[in-house]
Amino acid sequence: MDVTLFEKIINREIPAEILYEDDLSIVIRDIAPQAPTHLLIIPKKPIEMISKASDDDQMILGHLLLTAKSMASKLDLKDTFRLVINNGAKAGQSVFHLHIHLLSGRSMSWPPG
Ligand code: AMP
């Protein structure tokens, strides 16, 4: 499989604003923010999308959510944020390396578009 855009960011082959990194994940600022705070929580393992994750990925998936939680706390988002995973092109996915969007800083409507 081709190296994903996010693997290139993880490998420092292309630049990004990296806010956090550990053995399993990296957190960057989205290049085209859809809210005043728009982060991407990305596993270092290039899982294509959540529907392709396996039972072996349980720890990584839990880690991503807890990383989102700690980023929200670090950035003082006051328990007001939205986490989004787009799965598949028709659901809005454009980068085929799993990531969680963390959006905050504006009011949001439901249902999402
Ligand atoms: P999705 O459409 O759910 O796959 O989300 C992909 C996200 O990656 C979009 O919100 C893009 O704005 C963002 N993105 C694309 N290229 C970059 C980049 N080089 N650095 C940071 N974010 C990016």
Image (cartoon, rainbow, N blue to C red):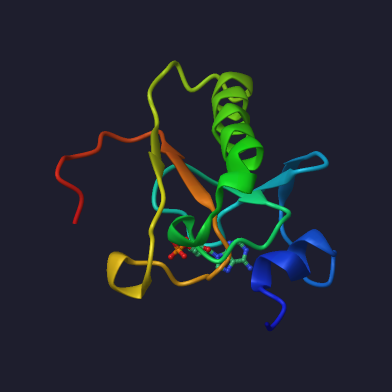
State the residue at coordinates (72%, 45%).
Answer: 25
Q: Can you say whether 91 is above or below 44 in the image? A: below
Q: Residue furthest left?
A: 111
Q: Nearer the viewer, residue 9 or 78?
A: 9
Q: Quadrant of residue 69?
A: top right
Q: Is residue 103 left or right of residue 46?
A: left
Q: Residue at x 68, y 82 (%)?
A: 1
Q: Residue furthest front?
A: 55
Residue 72 image position (x, y, % from top left)? 54, 26
Residue farthest to the bottom, as pictured: 2
Q: Is residue 37 visible?
A: yes
Question: Can residue 15 be seen?
Answer: no
In the rendered view, tell whether residue 56 sits above or below residue 30: above
Residue 108: image location, x then y, percent: 24, 38
Percent x, y of residue 109: 18, 40
Q: Residue furthest top?
A: 78
Image position of 99 (left or right of 7): left
Q: What is the number of callouts on the image?
A: 0
- Name the residue at 73% across, 54% down: 44
Task: Check the image and report above or below for 49 versus 25.
Answer: below
Q: Residue at x 38, y 58 (%)?
A: 86
Q: Quadrant of the C terminus?
A: bottom left
Above or below, 13 relative to 49: below
Give the x, y percent position of residue 92.
Answer: 34, 67
